Image: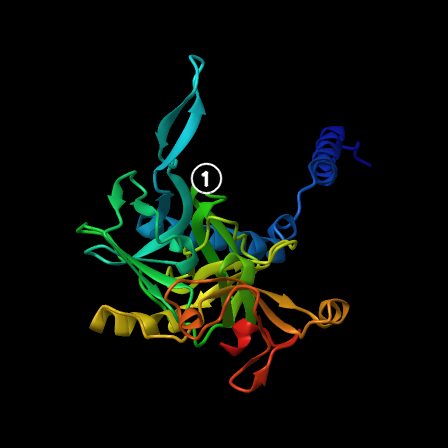
Amino acid sequence: MGKPNFKKIAIGVAMAVVILTILGGGIVADRLWGFKPLDRLFPRSGFRIDQRILTEESVVINVAEETSGSVVTVSMQTPKRTVLQFSPFGGFSQKVEGGTPQDIGTGFVISADGLIVTNKHVVANTGATYKVVTKDGKEYDAKEISRDPANDIAIIKIEASGLKPLELGDSSGLKVGQFVIAIGTALGEFRHTVTTGVISGLGRGITAGGGLEGYVEKLDDVIQTDAAINPGNSGGPLLNSAGQVIGVNVAVAQGAQNIGFALPINIVKEGLIQFKATGKFPAKPYLGVQYQMIDRQTAILNSVPQGAYVVDVIAASPAEVAGVGVGDIITKIGGEELSDKTTLADVI
């Protein structure tokens, strides 16, 4: 019987130990370092979410860069006035003060030669002077302002050339939930503020202004959005993801958050067609009074009829021509009675 070959046995044992060590080390390493398949390291759903966020960010950035240069700030300066001031040397002296220019609204370019769209209520003070300030800081005097009597829209004409007009889109196919971007002078201070949101509702009806303000506008078929629209954003564009104007920001709900409204661009375009053809907006009937509605309870308590109590009458207005005076109560227009639900603005 031959002797066992210890050398071969030792080598065999050593190789087995090495193999086991490699296998064991792999198992240990897998546990220590947490090696996992790629689809477990990068879940597909999370990857899609990150991709979507990056895509949305790119859309906003691209639209802001492409369109903000066509968005302007509207600045107003009230007329000069003479005030009396006390003199330390005795008596009073006169001092002429001019109103401080204030950024009050937003507008956007619709023609290379200087036509600017804004809201009518932004330029409602006919005794004031207005300027248009572009993104690069250039200031232009408003040479002419045309106000649309049918909608809260106005056109400002400035002497400029080479401006980049925004593309007007189509608001007829808008959908609730559609992504939108608003650009404007937020709070009359922060120029070219960009906010985003979605269309929250369509076909809304709102009443902007008030009878005592001398400005009441019944706006129908407006767009509701949760994109932040603040005072100063009025007249600015509401854009789609392609950078087209689909609305003109017009109002924000008082006492509420993230409820803003915009005029559909198709309504605006109807007036612009006639304006460009004739230089005028379509005419709209008006009465020419400042008023306060008397509700049913107030009417009963004061033994007066329910209707619109006239606070002031605009000179040379249809109301003055018809003999309407301060203190009158308008109860009926064209046979239609006024009530809590049917205001003077509704009937007119």
For the residue pair 189 and 124, the one nearer the viewer reads as 124
| Image quadrant occupied by the N terminus | top right
Residue at position x 36%, y 28% in the image: 95
**Outermost residue, left direction?**
161
Q: Amino acid at mark 1?
A: Glu
| Residue matched to label 1 | 189
- Of residues 296 and 250, which is closer to you in this image? 296
Query: Is residue 78 shown to the viewer in this render?
Result: yes
Question: In the current view of this chain or complex, which residue is farthest to the right?
Answer: 1
- Give the image location of residue 277, x and y in percent: 21, 73
Residue 90 in percent (x, y) is at: 43, 15
Name, please, the residue furthest toward the bottom. 335
> What residue sits 42% from the left and 29% below the top?
84
Rendering quarter of residue 91: top left
Residue most toward the top? 89
* Residue in the picture at 42% in, 69% down: 320
Residue 227 placed where, x, y %?
A: 54, 56
Quarter holding residue 258: bottom right
Dot 1: what SS?
loop
Looking at the image, residue 264 sits to the left or right of residue 328; the answer is left
Q: Is residue 89 above or below residue 223?
A: above
Q: Is residue 191 above or below residue 45?
A: above
Q: Is residue 135 left or right of residue 162?
A: right
Q: Quadrant of residue 200?
A: bottom right
Q: Position of residue 222 (x, y in %)?
A: 50, 69
Depicted 269 relative to depicted 187: above or below: below
The structure's colour scheme is: rainbow
Name the one closer to the observer, 161 or 188: 188
Q: Residues within 10 Å of mark 1 (few under 14, many from 20)?
A: some
The answer to whether any part of residue 240 appears in the image is no
Q: How many marks?
A: 1
